[in-house]
Structure formats: C-alpha cells, structure tokens
Amino acid sequence: MHPREADKAGIVSHFPSPSAFSLPPAPLSLPALRPPLIRMSAASFSLLFVLFLVASTAIKSGLMLRQIRHVAARRGTVPEPFSDSIGLTAHQRAADYTVARMRLAGVETLTSAVFVLALTLGGLLQTAHALVGQLWPTGNLLHGVALLAGIALASWLIELPFSLYRIFVIEKRFGFNRMTPALFISDTLKEGLLAALVGLPLLASVLWLMGAMGEYWWLWVWAFWLSFNLLVLLIWPTFIAPLFNTFTPLSDDALKNRVEALLQRCGFKAKGLYVMDGSRRSAHGNAYFTGFGAARRIVFFDTLLDKLAPAEVEAVLAHELGHFRHRHIVKRLAVLAPLSLALLALLGWLVTQPWFFGGLGAHSQDTATALALFFIALPAFTFPLGPLMSHWSRRHEFEADAYAAAQTHASDLVAALTKLYRDNASTLTPDPLYSRFFDSHPPAAIRIARLQALPE
C-alpha cells in the first residue's frame, strides 16, 4: 500500500535522449479537424468551465462547512448506540480530529481551484509550453513528456504543504503520526524515482499512440491503459509495496488457522497471509487483500492486530472477502472501463475543436496540451457523478457487512468496527448531506444498526 498520495514527485530535472524511450519515431501532429458536432466558441466554453469549477468548489466548501458545524454541535454527547462502548473523551477527540481535517481540506480545495484557474485561463500552462519549447521543439515527444511531467511536479509542490501539515501537525496532534522527517524524505525520493522510471515512459507511450495511431488513437490508448493497470495489480504486492513497507508472514498460529478456515469456507485462495508494519507511519489500522489471481495476498496492519481480538480480526477479514464474493471489484471495473473509454473518445473529439484549447487559455493545439487540459478540467465537469459513486460504494459496504455476518458473527464485526471508530477517531455524527456526497462507507450509527438487525 502506498504510504502517501504524493505520487507526483520531482521527475523533470533530467530527461533521457529520444532513443532511451525505445519508441519508433512518429509525428505528433493531430488528425485533420472534423466538422464540429457542437456549436461552441472559446468564450462560451470558458464561461461554462468557470461556472462548473466555481459551482463544484462552492458545493464542496459548503458541504465541508456543514460537516464542521454538524460535528462540532454534537461534540458534547456520545450517540446512544455507542454510549456504552465509546467514552465522551474519545468522542470529543474524534470530533476535533474531523473538524481539523475538514478545515485543512477546505483550504486545500480553494487552493486547488485557484491553481486550476492559473493553469488554464491564467495562461500558466501556455507559459510552461513556451518555456519547454526552448528546450525541445513543439510536437516533439520529449517536449510533450516534459510539459506533462512539469505540470505533475507543480501539482505535487502545491499539495506538499498540505501533506506536511496533515502528517506532522494534525496527525501528530491527535496521536496518529509515527512518520519521521527522515522517513518522509525517503518515501518522497522513492516515489520520485518510481514516477521517473514508470511515469515518464508511460507518458511517452501515450503521447506516441496519440500521434501515431490516427483518428482512433483513443482506442489504442484505452487498451494500453487497461493493460498497464492490470500489470500494476500483478506486480504491486511483490515489487512495489515492499519498497515502502515490510511484509512478514502471519506468525500467530491460532489466528492463522482461524483465517485459513475462513478462507476455505469462503472459497478464497490467497498466496499468503502477511502483516505490514503500518505502525512505522501511522497508528491507524486496516486490513486488505491485494493483487489478483495467483498474486493475491491478504495483508493485516500490525496496528489492527494489536487492537482487535482474533474473532474481530476474522470478522473484519470476512467483510473484505465479502467484496470479493460479491465481485465488487469486477463490477467497478465493468463500469470504469467503458467510462474511461467514453472519456478518451470524448478527448479524441475535443482535440479537433479549436474552442476547447482557446476556451481553456491555450493557443497551442498539440497532443500534450490537449491531454493536460482535459485532465485539468475534467474534475469540474464530473463532480456531479461523485454522489452516485459514493452511494454505490456504500451499498457495497452493506453487502460486504451482511456477508461477514453470515460467515462469522455480526456481533464480532460490530465490536471490531466500534473499536476502529474509537481508535481511528472516526466521527460518529457526520452531517447527513456531506456523508451522501463524499462518504464511501455508511455512517457509523446506520451501519451498526443494520448489523445488529441481522440474525446471528
């Protein structure tokens, strides 16, 4: 598991020669423009983009403010379902932790919106395009890779202060952080090296396909992207994750026998049971399975094993196996794969529309600029899909809970979740509207009530 989300490390200080990418030369000029399917001017698209960006930012900020007020107003009383298992001090700690994280997220949301505007209508992307053009000709493969890598680096630099404050101020204040500055720097260097070794050739391959495969390049990019993601699923557990954490075989024989019996009941085959040293970075606990096919592994955070009884660990794992049994990952891929194809097809059309470039503040109309603009602007337009995806995820959580209750005992899962809510300082009183928009898991009270209603 990746230790942090700062995966856009510095990757643009030096670039290899064109031959180092081992890609045949190909022109990066765009296909001939087709007649527009939608009548749109650059000014109209600029206005539409700003409206979506402002609306999404305002909605996010408003919902976070609701969450802060709602949680703070209920800080003084533990909800009835948890009054016997979670003390007032722990409840208040969770409320304060939630408020602190929300306030930081609010500032980060506004900063991100300003950065997006600066990149697009502010002309920062076009300026970067011109600066990179002094090193490599526009349309050259290295020009495109350097431009996209530079944007990734700039995004990472914008996010860095928030990551540092989250880890070394908020997480430390509430007793969760165990990350040292030296470990943070080590992780960052490893992430940067991975980004360079994997990300740069990946960008080069995508740009080459966009320029070499004609009008329907997006089909080739889609197939390449899916193949790459499948490859990552295969190699992540054995090659990438160990770069950041130590994985040791589960040594508790009693727990191991219990888990293996559960796996046999559930028809789940795993390559191994491992304990991860999550405590090196955080006091938060979790469990997950990773990879697919012969590479599947079940991983427990050492912090989770320290906090839960064996029956509770078994119930948590049964919940994770419920996702497997209900084929939730397959279902999500079945939706995301055609959705990604549709988005790439949309990009395939947008690159032929001058108003798309001009409406987002760019004069250059090459493949790298198109790719950058598309993924910079996309979140503003896809924001309305967020609540639907959150609702779908919560349904999956309920299904996995029901499966766990059938394979183990609902009371064990309730006990485990209650401990995790307490020890991870998860709020017991989220704002209902905020939760519907953003939460991938059901609110604690609703989730526990559902489990308690299930037969033992």
Image (cartoon, rainbow, N blue to C red):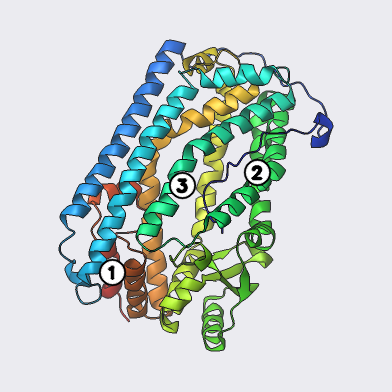
Image coords of residue 240 (percent x, y): 66, 57
Residue at numbered disc 1: 448
Q: Nearer the viewer, residue 403 or 91?
A: 91
Residue 41 seen in render: no
Residue with the mark numbered 2: 195
* Picture mark count: 3
**Are the residues tagged 1 and 3 within 8 Å (C-beta)?**
no
Image depth: mark 1 or mark 3 in front = 3
Q: Is residue 3 above or below residue 87?
A: above
SS state under label 1: helix
Name the spot of residue 65 as percent of width and height, x first. Answer: 24, 42
- Which amino acid type corresponds to the residue marked 3 in the rendered image? Ser
Mark 1 to mark 2: distance in Å? 41 Å
Considering the numbered disc 2 on the image, is that residue within a helix, a strand or a loop? helix
| In the image: residue 106, left or right of residue 355 | left
Instruction: Rate crowding at label 1 as few (under 14), some (14 to 19) or many (20 or more) other CA atoms within 10 Å.
Output: many
Q: CA distance from mark 2 to mark 3?
A: 18 Å
- Amino acid type at circle 2 is Ala
Q: Is residue 307 visible?
A: yes
Q: Can you give x and y, in whole percent of width and height, for residue 144 in the image?
A: 67, 26
Q: Quadrant of the N terminus?
A: bottom right
Task: Say which mark, if any, is on residue 163.
Answer: 3
